[in-house]
Amino acid sequence: MGRTHRMETTFPRIADPLGYVPKEDILYAVKAIVVTQRENGRRDDRKFSRMKYLLSSWGIEKFRSVVEQYYGKKFEPFRELPEWQFKSYLGWHEQGDGGLFCGLHVDSGRLGGKMKKTLREVIEKYNLNVRITPNQNIILCDIRSAWKRPITTVLAQGGLLQPRYVDPLNITAMACPAFPLCPLAITEAERGIPDILKRVRAVFEKVGLKYNESVVVRITGCPNGCARPYMAELGLVGDGPNSYQIWLGGTPNQTSLARTFMNKVKVQDLEKILEPLFYHWKRKRQSKESFGEFTTRMGFEKLQELVDKWEGPIQSASRHNLKLFADKETYEAVDELAKLQSKSAHQLAIEVIRNFVASQQMEK
């Protein structure tokens, strides 16, 4: 994933099929690949030391030929794999051996306070095995059926919610640690993503997208790509103090590369870019077309034109006007609070209602 801003000779890259080997030969094949890189990869410049640059320079056919010389025989033809599906593994599932597992969403993989204490108590009490997913979530394994109800109750009380209470945008979102932990960071990622996701949700509501709709959002504090922004539908890559490079065009199953759409977009200006993009996706997408697929089909030149000409969504008499359902004093109080959070009164009211419903569900 790693690259350097505005140095086109560096780039993210997805894999090419090399071939098939029986499982007993896996170690020998891996050794042959590593030796090929060791003997032929760039060692003089750290920016180009990755195997992806050797593959790009040689092409897969030459690379396979050299690897086979070290391997001692030819690879078998590549065997087609089923289409990759992204699975969150959140919630309760059959484990396959009579037990259950429970996947828990953890924003940016960061646990603390009551949530951390609760999780530790559950793991120790039931002696559970734990797995950590590539999406920064936690899976509790080897749970007996009789334990499901008490564990669900305790987890909810500790703030570890079932997936139906997690905003769909948060399910696939990811950020690298960035400030203050990474010396390579040039702007925020993990500390900034909660607010950015709320702002994306607010734009969704403003342009009429449904709550259950989502896009894959990834944010990194520098171009090294540790949170895989280059495979996201919407990738934000640190490009200066409080500014990001915007990448578009990945797919929901995260199997294709995005491309650079805009450079040095200040964090406070994100809505100016996202509003027209999401508005036109809502109105011009084809059946079941994801945001990433839409941006690829439209082309960046057309998308840039839509952004440049944007004057805001066409306003109509909204059925979501809070004024119709609240007295004047209540509406003005909500509206004042909403402005402090850069939201509309309706958006804040909906957020309060959702949080109230979730809290009531947890208490049951």
Image (spheres, rainbow, N blue to C red):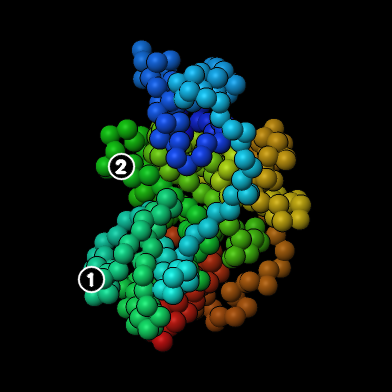
Looking at the figure, which quarter contains the C terminus?
Answer: bottom left
What type is the residue that disc 1 sits on? Glu
Residue sitting nearer the eye, 36 or 182: 36
Q: Position of residue 258 (x, y in %)?
A: 58, 37
* Figure check: 86 above or below 33: below
Q: Position of residue 308 (x, y in %)?
A: 66, 37
* Figure check: 208 above or below 357: above
Please name which of the two marks, 1 or 2, marks the residue nearer to the observer.
1
On screen, residue 289 versus residue 189, left or right, reads right
Quarter residue 19 falls in:
top right
Q: Residue at x 35, y 50 (%)?
A: 191
Q: Residues within 10 Å of mark 1 (few under 14, many from 20)?
A: few
- Does the rendering let one see residue 260? no
Q: Residues within 10 Å of mark 2 (few under 14, many from 20)?
A: some
Residue sitting nearer the eye, 202 or 229: 229
Name, please, the residue furthest toward the bottom.
364
Q: Residue at x 47, y 53 (%)?
A: 173
What type is the residue that disc 2 sits on? Phe
Q: Secondary structure at mark 2?
A: loop
Q: Position of residue 190 (x, y in %)?
A: 37, 49
Residue sitting nearer the eye, 23 or 346: 23
Residue 179 disc label: 2
Q: Secondary structure at mark 1?
A: helix
* Figure check: 112 above or below 349: above
> Total number of numbered labels?
2
Residue sitting nearer the eye, 293 or 122: 122
Which of disc 2 and disc 1 is earlier in sequence?
Answer: 1
Residue matched to label 1: 124
Residue 48 disc label: none
Q: Residue at x 41, y 54 (%)?
A: 133
